[in-house]
Amino acid sequence: MAIKHLYHPYPVVPCIIIVKHNNKINGMSVAWHTPLSFSPPLYGVLISPKRYTYELIVQAKDFTVNFVDFEKAELYAIMGRISGRDRDKIKDFNIELVESSKINSPYLKDAYAVYECLKHRQVKTGDHIMFVGEIVETHENEEKFTEKGLPDMRKLKPAFYLGKDNYFTLKDIEGPFVILPEE
């Protein structure tokens, strides 16, 4: 049986992986990613061995996981469709990076949330490799989060990926939000 479409789990909030090895910096959009553990804090990103970012992460000791607002969704398209083998995306598109505080790989200045990750392990999962990163530092744009650390959906418009370069965001969220009491 041939599987035609695997877009049933979409929409998803994508992320952008930034990795630096030696003097090479590259970024890549990733739709397949997930938290894995609280203790230690682990995060997984799945990357095809065909990708230039894969080559860099194999050699690097770390990477960042970056989330950007819908207003910056063009970054997902740039990072997802242009290979770092062919172009220096960071330089050619004037993408601003910030030096990480605990690792070598930088992160996106325009990200509303960032995980600095030390490469913990890699696991073959069919035609992709899951790179497991231990989160050693986080960064948030405090204006986009509530006092409790939750995304403030009145200020944050996350990008959602539908597959094949299609993105959308939620519009005009007024609430009410259902917030269950803490136990």
Image: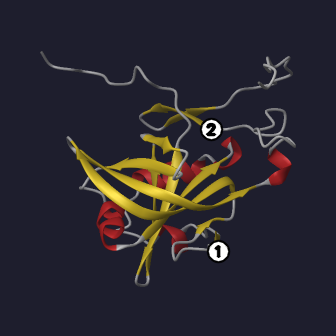
Image side of residue 7 versus residue 10, left or right: left
- What amino acid does circle 1 point to? Ser
Which residue type does callout 2 highlight?
Ala
Image point (43%, 48%), residue name: 44
Q: Residue at x 32, y 63 (%)?
A: 52
Q: Which mark is residue 12?
A: none
Indicate left or right for 172 with 75 as reference. right
Q: Residue furthest front?
A: 183
Asked whether, in this view, residue 58 is left or right of residue 68, the answer is left
Residue 56 location in percent, x, y? Answer: 34, 69
Q: Is residue 154 depicted above or below 95 in this figure?
A: above
Instruction: Farthest residue to the bottom: give it.
Output: 23
Count of marks placed on residues? 2
Q: CA distance from mark 1 to mark 2?
A: 26 Å
Q: Which of the numbered marks, if any, corresponds to residue 159?
A: 2
Q: Position of residue 53 (x, y in %)?
A: 36, 62
Q: Quarter holding the C terminus?
A: top right
Q: Measuring 64% from the left and 74% from the top, which residue is drawn there?
A: 101
Disc number placed over residue 101 in the picture, else none:
1
